[in-house]
Image: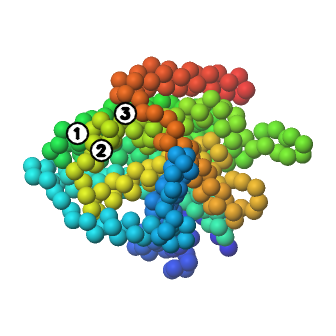
Amino acid sequence: MFPLTTLLPEAVARALFGGPPTRAEFAVAALLAAALVSFVPLTSAAVVIWAKRKVTAAFTDRIAPNRTGPYGTLIIVADIFRLLSKELVVPEGVDRPAYDLGPLLVAFSAILGFAVIPMGSLFGVTLQLADPEVGLAYVFAVASIATLGLLLCGYASNNKYSFLGGLRAVAQNIAYEIPLVLTGASVVLFTGSLRMSDIVATQQQPLVAVAGVTVPSWYALVNPFAFVLFMVANLAEVGRNPFDIPEAPTEIVAGYQTEYSSVYFVLIYMGEFIHIFLGGAIVATLFLGGAAGPGPESLGLLWFLAKIWGVFLFTQWARSAVPRVRIDQLIEIGWKGMLVLSLVNLVLTAVVVGVVS
């Protein structure tokens, strides 16, 4: 059996080739491991086609899909075939290289973020592709690439509404990425490391015992103020109400994705939800103990999935219940509200850590 510190690529390499793998063998194993890890966000993005309709219908007292398969679940297959079978219409005057590249950046930047997320352990193997010392910085960096993709989509479409949506996406990202990173930095002050596995490990220590039940040191409990700030900033990062300004159907049609159809629309649509699940994975890792939960370690992946789906349900609640703010209000909330509060949280966390240590 592999030690608990064995990452997935190494485990796959040993299982396939036995003994210490060569560089070529390890590269093949890493690709297979990446495919296994990608299965989690891609499957979640497929299931969300059905889940978001059910959740939204429950919030708004409407009837969700209930005829296409049991409980409407085959709507997933129907929608995939419907979207992919549509004609790919490319408007005149588009900047074709940027038009083609934008949807790819939106979709795959989110998948790249899952490379350093620890998703639990199975059979002594850590479900994680890599565990670099700068893991948290890497996640924030690759997640931000999606904004470049949205800007390319808006610019290249030769459509003023799309261009406005792309510009709004950049303005929103700048306004809320800084509070998001600063709030994440407050967790780093507690942990003393940017490594994702270290952040999860420090949350396994007992915080308090109540009636014989040990409460772990999840940072959502240690610093609930930072947790709330991060959740709000994450709403803006993934473009959910009240921060869905880059799409804003009642104002700019559909923003950056107005001129996209067929497989390109699928990539943008899929990328949007994979980013929501990446946001949930970051929240689970930084504030909710990662894959930790009651029961044996073999249930860690299930607990991890439950946590990221919990974050998804929160974003769907916001989408159904919270009205959209104006673009000027969004910028004001980000720069005058979230930025100031995140700086206050960072300073107070530094003081507390300095006093305690």
What percent of the width, then of the height, locates residue 58? Answer: 56, 50
What percent of the width, then of the height, locates residue 290? Answer: 63, 50
- Residue sitting at x 41%, y 41%: 239
Q: Choose between 142 and 44: the one closer to the eye.
A: 44
> Is disc 1 in contact with disc 2, using a CB cutoff of under 8 Å?
yes
Circle 3 packing at 10 Å, graded few (<14), some (14-19), many (20+), is: many
Is 69 situated above or below 257?
Answer: below
Q: Which residue is mark 3?
A: 172
The residue furthest front is: 62
Looking at the rendered structure, which numbered label has been put on residue 161?
A: 1
Q: Earlier in the sequence, mark 1 or mark 2?
A: 1
> Is disc 2 in contact with disc 3, using a CB cutoff of under 8 Å?
no
Dot in front, 3 or 1: 1
**Which quarter of the figure has residue 89?**
bottom left
What percent of the width, then of the height, locates residue 314? Answer: 56, 44
Q: Which residue is mark 2?
A: 254
Q: Choose between 180 and 308: the one closer to the eye.
A: 308
Separation of disc 1 and disc 2 at Cα? 8 Å
Q: Choose between 82 and 124: the one closer to the eye.
A: 82
Q: Earlier in the sequence, mark 2 or mark 3?
A: 3
Helix, strand or loop at label 3? It is helix
Helix, strand or loop at label 1? It is helix
> Is disc 3 in contact with disc 1, using a CB cutoff of under 8 Å?
no
Judging from the image, the colouring scheme is rainbow
- Residue sitting at x 16%, y 57%: 90
**In what quadrant of the picture does the N terminus appear?**
bottom right
